[in-house]
Amino acid sequence: MGKDKLKRFEENKSFRCLYQPEFEEVFRTDYKIKGLWHKEHFANQRDIVLELGCGRGEYTIALARKYPHKSFIGVDIKGARLWRGAKTATDEQMDNAAFVRCRIEFIESVFARDEVSEIWITFPDPQIKRDNKRLTSAGFLQRYRTFLKDGGVVHLKTDSPFLYNYTLELVKQNNLELLEANEDIYGSGRADELLSVKTRYESQFLSMGMKITYLSFCLRRDGALKEPVWDSEQFER
C-alpha cells in the first residue's frame, strides 16, 4: 500500500463528516447514527439526499454547494476515494455534506425509515452478469424502501446502455412512476446545472464519445418488486 493511501486513511479518522463503521457495527445490527442523522449530525430537519457509490464524492460536494437548503451524504466502500470528498467538505466547512464508508449491501443498517428523501446513483458498475449486485435491481430497491420516504425519487446517471434499459424496464414492469428517461443528456440539451455535474469517470466517458443517460422515478413503499423480463443481450457491451 502506497504512502499516500496510508496518509489518507489516517487523515480520514480526523474528519467529522466521515463515518467508517466496522463490519460488526453494520452486519445484522443498526449503526449508531441510524435514525439520528437529522438530530445529531446535521442538527436540522432538511431533506437528506444520498449518493450511492459516490467514489471521490464529486457529485455529493457539487450538490451540497448548489443546494444549501438540503443535506447530502455520499456512500462508498473505498476509503482512499472518500478522502477527497471528506477533505473538501472539511476544508470548506460545509455543514450539509457527509460521507459513509460502507458497502451498499449494509445500507439498511445506516439509515432509518423516512430518513432519506432522494437517492442518486451515479455511474455504478452495471454488473451485467450479476443482477444481485446491480444497484438498481429489485433487491436493492427493496433495501432503499426501508429508509426512503414513500414516493421518494431515485436518480440514475450512467454511461451504460445495459443498465439504463434494464432499469427502465424494471420501472415499467413494476408500474413505478417514471419521471424522466433520457438516452443522451448532452446531445439532447437536457444537461442543466444539476445533470451537468461531471464526475471523474463521466469526464472520461465523454472524452471517448460515449453518451450519458439519465433516468428518474418514484419508489413507493408498498407492493411487490420483481426483476424485469427483457432481452438483455442486445444491450450488453
Image: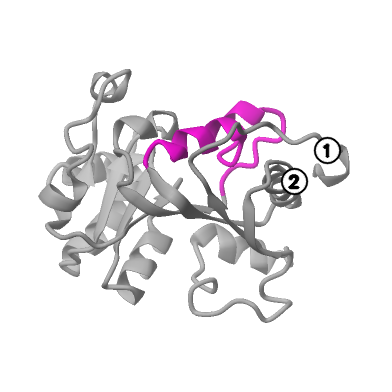
Relative to 43, is 162 on the left or the right?
Answer: right
Q: Nearer the viewer, residue 71 or 146?
A: 146
Residue range of the region highlighted in magenta in the rendering? 124-147
Q: Residue furthest front?
A: 222
Q: Residue at x 55, y 39 (%)?
A: 135
Relative to 125, is 87 on the left or the right?
Answer: left
Kindly report the distance in space between the C-alpha atoms of the residues bearing marks 1 and 2: 7 Å
Which amino acid lies under the numbered mark 2 shown in the image of this protein?
A: Glu
Image quarter for residue 158? Answer: bottom right
Q: Residue at x 23, y 23 (%)?
A: 25
Q: Residue at x 66, y 30 (%)?
A: 131
Which amino acid lies under the numbered mark 1 shown in the image of this protein?
A: Trp
Relative to 76, is 109 on the left or the right?
Answer: left
Disc 1 designates what residue? 230
Is 105 inside the magenta-drawn segment? Answer: no
| Residue 179 on image: x %, y % | 62, 63
| Quadrant placement of the N terminus | top left
| Residue 48 on image: x %, y % | 31, 56
Mark positioned earlier in the residue sequence (1 or 2) = 2
Marks 1 and 2 in Cβ contact (< 8 Å): yes
**Image position of 150 with respect to 214: above or below:** above
Disc 2 designates what residue? 169
Q: Is residue 16 visible?
A: no
Is 132 inside the magenta-drawn segment? Answer: yes
Q: Residue at x 55, y 79 (%)?
A: 192
**Image position of 104 with respect to 85: above or below:** above
Q: Is residue 167 visible?
A: yes
